[in-house]
Amino acid sequence: MFALDYKTKVPIYEQIQDQVISFIALGIFKPNEQLPAVRQLASDLGVNPNTVAKAYQELERLGYIVSQTGRGSFISDTSNIIDMLKSEYIEQLKSLLRKMKTLNIPHQDIILVTNSIFKKERQQ
Amino acid sequence: MFALDYKTKVPIYEQIQDQVISFIALGIFKPNEQLPAVRQLASDLGVNPNTVAKAYQELERLGYIVSQTGRGSFISDTSNIIDMLKSEYIEQLKSLLRKMKTLNIPHQDIILVTNSIFKKERQQ
Amino acid sequence: MFALDYKTKVPIYEQIQDQVISFIALGIFKPNEQLPAVRQLASDLGVNPNTVAKAYQELERLGYIVSQTGRGSFISDTSNIIDMLKSEYIEQLKSLLRKMKTLNIPHQDIILVTNSIFKKERQQ
Amino acid sequence: MFALDYKTKVPIYEQIQDQVISFIALGIFKPNEQLPAVRQLASDLGVNPNTVAKAYQELERLGYIVSQTGRGSFISDTSNIIDMLKSEYIEQLKSLLRKMKTLNIPHQDIILVTNSIFKKERQQ
DNA sequence: GTGGTCTAGACCACC
DNA sequence: GTGGTCTAGACCACA
């Protein structure tokens, strides 16, 4: 389920963190669902428990999950997780589009790409 | 001309590197043009010469510039730099849009954001 | 009557403990009054009996209650509980105010905050 | 300068963190000043470098300091550090006053304490 | 069983 | 030199 890439400069804990977030976004992890235990996931990934713990702590700080000593870690039940994700993606989009504009990539190209994702790929 | 941001986590050498690339892409640096000397740029930026040297080495490794010991560093005449960057950004955009689609962000929202960047921000 | 907050990092047993103390301080629990049975309170709160037991043990250790095996737990007749708590809070307040003074927070601001709590919030 | 208490439940990294903050509040650490290096402070305190690193990372996240790989850690130059501290202390004060009000500590007592700090101790 | 903290020691990228 | 990350392994408090 999780997949780590040791070649990239992105730290392991951040890869774990990002994947949990995208699993939430994809609906694979649902609100209030229990996450794998720190030690469990660590041994699954062949990684030190501290590394997974750091990822979970970051996720808690960001509000995506809630960890309770003695009970486990759970996807937040706050219904605004999806809203958090949406607004974050919107920000990423804006930042990317600004970079593209400075390169003089025409507005029309963006529109074509957007349509290709939202229309042609609808059947996927 | 160059502007460094010490608050961000992006390393200094990478900021220099990225700015050279965007200057090439924007046509500010033209093929075969000579880059500022390492020591010169370093003192302009108030930065260790090693840092600038590292940026130049990376740029040479990536094919954007060529360095000739004793003469200086020059922009490569690779005319396809802009195209390379464009297609890279397009891929990033596609990937991001796919994630946004799985979150059911409406196509209309993307269009609004895109317009806001490409129309309203045009004066910036 | 008791209210647990699972989001906070304060352990459950400590939340129970704190609430018993404040109930004593507020006169809701009176000296020699019997506390709810461990198993009863545990099931009311949807919590492990060990957790309630730990809270009661702490309370006994601190002298707020006495437990008699086979009979139950009872509020101590220490009538000075409230005074103990008050002087503790007064000390915390002094320490905090001293820190605020070193930051040059004006006396007037403190007065405003105090009034806002003790006057405007009186209806709560 | 720093003093650790191993008896309390407050984790070491948090004690370090709190002390840095109060040193800022007291004007001992000034904006843009360099903090002791992670390893240096760790060996001074007889503590593992990771523990100090965690404290510094928290402080950076909170905006009190800025850390740069290869250069060191510095007190933030944003002039609003003091404002951050002030508003945080105000919040602590409110929370404490609310607890005191539920104990029916009279408003007059608070006023007396406040005056004793802000007037009588002025000569200290 | 859970997560939280800490130590010991290592390696890396950066300046 | 600096901070950032990771491992190995340990202990603790909590439920």
Image: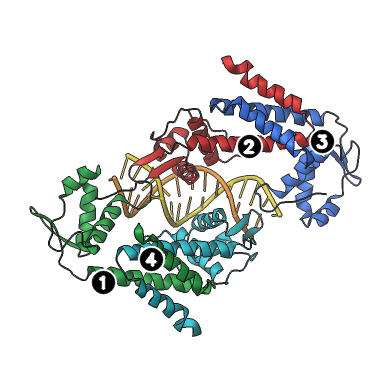
Chain colours: A cyan, B green, C blue, D red, E orange, F yellow
Task: Verify CB contact (< 8 Å) between mark 1 and mark 2.
Answer: no
State the residue in front, D67 or A81: A81
Residue D92, numbered circle: 2
Labels 4 and 1 within one chain: yes
Q: Residues within 10 Å of mark 2 (few under 14, many from 20)?
A: some
Q: Nearer the viewer, mark 1 or mark 2?
A: 1
Q: Which residue is mark 1?
A: B83
Q: Which three-letter amino acid code belongs to the residue tagged 1?
A: Asp
Q: Residue at x 72, y 44 (%)?
A: C14
Label 1: chain?
Answer: B
Q: Which three-letter amino acid code belongs to the residue tagged 2?
A: Gln
Task: Calculate the distance from the C-alpha at mark 2 to the C-alpha at mark 4.
Answer: 46 Å
Q: Which residue is mark 4?
A: B118
Compared with A57, D100 (above or below) is: above
Label 3: chain?
Answer: C
State the residue in front, A47 or D114: D114
Task: Assign a secondary structure to mark 4.
Answer: helix
Q: Nearer the viewer, mark 3 or mark 1?
A: 1
Labels 2 and 4 within one chain: no
Q: Which residue is mark 3?
A: C25
Q: Position of residue B74 (x, y in %)?
A: 14, 59
Question: Taking A3 as reference, is A37 left or right?
Answer: right
Labels 3 and 4 within one chain: no
Q: Which three-letter amino acid code belongs to the residue tagged 3?
A: Ala
Q: Nearer the viewer, mark 3 or mark 4?
A: 4
Task: Assign a secondary structure to mark 2.
Answer: helix
Q: Residues within 10 Å of mark 4 (few under 14, many from 20)?
A: some
